[in-house]
Amino acid sequence: MSFVLSEDQQMLRDTAMAFARDEMPVSHLRELRDGGANGVDAEMRGKLAELGFFGVLVPEEYDGVGLGMVAMGQIMEAQGRTIAATPLLQTAVMGASALILGGSEAQKAEWLPKIASGEATVALAVDEGTHHAPLNIATEAERNGQGYTLNGAKRYVPDGHHADVFIIAARTFGEAGQAHGISLFLVPNNADGLSVNALNTVDSHGAAHLTLEDVAVGEDSVLGAVDAGWEVLEPTLDRGRIALAAEALGSAQAAFDMTLEYMQTRKQFGQLIGSFQSLQHRAAKMFTDLELTRSCIAAALSGVDENRNDMAELASLAKARASDLIHLVSNETVQFHGGIGMTDAHDSGLYMKRARVQEALLGGGSYHRDRYAKLNGF
Amino acid sequence: MAFDAPEDLEEFRTNVQNWLEENCPPSMRTPMKDDEIVWGGTREAFKNPDSKVWLERMGENGWTAPEWPAEYGGGGLNKAQARILQQELRRIKARPALFSFGLWMFGPALLEFGNDEQKKRFIPDIVKGKTRWCQGYSEPGAGSDLADLQTKCEDKGDHWLINGQKVWTSYADQADWIFCLVRTDKSVKHEGISFLVFDMQTEGVEARPIKLISGSSPFCETFFTDVKVPKDQLVGKLNGGWTIAKRLLQFERSSISAGGFGGTGGSGILPPQDYAKQHVGVDETGRVADGDLRARITDHLMYAKAFGLTVQRSTEEAKAGQEVGHTASIMKYAAAKMNQDKCELLVEALGTDGLGWSGDGFAEDAKKATRGWLRSKGNSIEGGTSEINLNVVAKRVLGLREHQ
């Protein structure tokens, strides 16, 4: 495991941090929200593509830069700092990972260059209930002569409202709860029978519910082996969880920095509120949690690049701790700011709203604690 | 020096391997038993005779303090060599040859602040484990506010005269020498403190063990009545003791967070999830039946994993020459929380089996867990309370100001 960035990774981190600060500050999310964009921002997508951010995981032979997860994590952390709405998690992390891990040569050749160039956005659609439960897939994919017919529904799919292509997890065998029998399908957004219902979400990033009614896809749209989609899906989800944890870490750090600055400027009773011990100790504890969580995320990111065999454990560790961290820090950010923290004009609330989405997506603290316990045999 | 340390690292590793093969007794490659820990000093009984041989051989090489200068009896190794030595010791599962406040706390401070004569006089016996040291810091009226200490030290021309009392002096009744903070100027607070060392056999020194809630007595009250100390046993400048004291506390806190905590339970205690399976039971899938307890155990295990990864990260960052102040300063607080949570979970998972005190009605490991749980309550008090450590983080790391 490596905790120190290479020169390339450090350079990418610096670029990403500067880009987030200058080009997509929180005020930009505010503008998107107030303009009704629902988190969709074609211009920003173009800029991110120009920087090569969509191709960080994509190998060079498919027009990417193949820098790996540690590098990707730096970008995710940077976008977390300003709670920016980008398609990176779905497209550059999970979409790219699913194709790299399970795609056929033809699928890779078709989609990976488009991902790397920012031309296509991808959305992995797994969950069907209100809580992350990737084994509970009931959407059916029925064999029909030339291919498959898909029927079912997906809930709260991030970037679902503007994805060009979906990766739909559906069941070709068995029943909800079983890993065997899950298969993955590439489904374009204009497929007959697919309806996309855009959602106005609390974090202003948007998402979509999907309904699939007799959606017909060809044999060549199966991603990975039939019935064995879980072998691609689980590591793909783990990469997404780690990347999302890195994003949440960035948000937590930014919210904490903002709070710390307020403690050093706001006066009450003729004193800086940062001189009050009850606040100092809470800040010091948050800082401790930040540092401990940072180590877990660094370990998980580099674990992917090193192909470690304890990735499930490291991913759950990172996502559970990051979820708990952003929950705590976002709440304390509002509380430390007092009345101003309750106003829409202040950024505290935006961090808290995005925090809950970061927690819920791909499993929160309790989901990943439970998974960690299972992995450890109790 | 008994060991020739070649510059070439691969050669060095081979030599270390050969030396360990020849010199580390087989029983020293088995897990440490609680009653076989060697603290050294003139009262050391060496319950396992092999531990004496092991200490002598390691001490001869200076390998109890691998990176200390060879001229004072240390190993004289550079960082890379010391790392290899550690890897090789770990590989053969060698027990630490010596546990010692001299090694962890006093020695590093003396190397930094002592004069050459003092280093020559004290460091070699620390390395070889011949002298056992104790720490005279806290007083009945000076705990968290340590700088308020009142133990009086008067300049009597040819000697210092000490009168006063220390408390929470770890193993003072077992120690040969003490490093001690004394007041040499009453008119100022921090600038009136000096750092002295003296022999615990000196007339007028008395150490009385304090019995703790756990039943054990690792700490003493130590009384000084007209104790005469030679003038050359002042370390650093007169009234310059606070700087040394603070530096030494850093060594103490980092040795505590590196795993030197009292109350971890010791050998033979199982992880909490194993006790939970045995005593709470399992569901049809073999998992701990009580979901709430299972979640809290998991939360603790994750915290412990995060702590371990953070120790690893700060080591790597230090190696890469990055600023590590951030991670180091939070570790004492985090280590205390982690250990106390673990001890609470052990007792909870054991149920009434975790509520025994003595006798055959309770298993040895369970009784150890119970005593360890009680002992662990000191983790957030000793070496700076958790509250004081949070103050330090707020002030030095986060840059928050003090209340005016």
Image (cartoon, coloured by chain):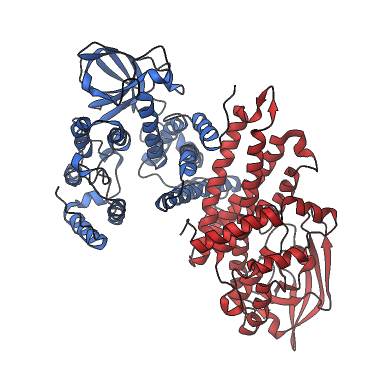
Chain colours: A red, B blue
A248 relative position to A206: left or right = left
Observer-nearest of A353 and A220: A353
Observer-nearest of B289 and A205: A205
Could you tell me residue B344's position as x and y percent? 50, 37
Toward which corner of the image does residue A57 lie, by quadrant?
A: bottom right
Could you tell me residue A293's position as x and y percent? 55, 49
**Position of B65 relative to B188 (above/below):** below
Could you tell me residue A108's position as x and y percent? 63, 80
**Position of B56 relative to B231 (above/below):** below
Observer-nearest of B255 and A156: B255
Residue depicted at 78% across the width and 67% down the height: A162
Residue depicted at 48% across the width and 66% down the height: A306
Quarter the C terminus of chain B occupies: top right
Regarding residue B19, the answer to whether it shows in the image is: yes
**Position of B45 relative to A9 (above/below):** above
Could you tell me residue A227's position as x and y percent? 64, 77
Toward which corner of the image does residue B248 lie, by quadrant?
A: top left
Q: What is the number of callouts on the image?
A: 0
